[in-house]
Amino acid sequence: MAAVEDAALAKLMNLLQTEPEPSSGPEGGLVPTAPGHDIPALREQLAVLVSTGKAKEAIGVQLTHKQVKRLSYKDVEKYTKRYTQQNFLNAHFRASRPKYRPSLH
């Protein structure tokens, strides 16, 4: 069992090193921007996370709307990157983890 988990983790780490960051698009979430980052749009998406109460779960920090408004450009990019990486990890773990099916025997 541990060997399977180690293999899945190794595969995931390899994917993180070789694949670009995913875009979330219609699934909801933060949409990565091109080199000329649209900070106000990313800030607004962070505000949506705060409004839905999912900021702590999504980025690891509980923020208020005032704090989101005061975030520096660097912090907005940091939290956006943290959120997209977390979604990427969650998607790969859900896909690689076998479904538990209780035995009736």
Image (spheres, grey):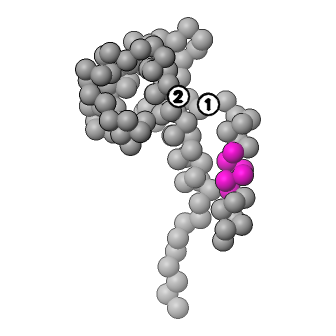
Residue shown at the point (41%, 39%) measured from the top left: 60
Residue occupying the far bottom of the picture: 105
Q: The N terminus appears in which quarter of the rendering?
A: bottom right
Report if residue 11 lies within the magenta region: yes
Point out residue 82 in the picture as x, y percentages from the top left corner. Answer: 50, 33
The kind of secondary structure element at disc 1 is loop
What percent of the width, then of the height, locates residue 10? 72, 52
- In x, y percent, where is residue 19? 70, 34
Residue 41 showing in the rendered view: no
Dividing the picture into quarters, in which one does residue 13 lie?
Answer: top right
Label 2 sits on what residue type?
Lys
Q: Earlier in the sequence, mark 1 or mark 2?
A: 1
* Residue receiving disc 2: 81
Decide if residue 6 is on the left or right side of residue 99: right
Which residue carries the number 1 mark?
A: 21
Question: Which residue lies at the image location 49% right of the left edge and 20% below the top edge?
Answer: 77
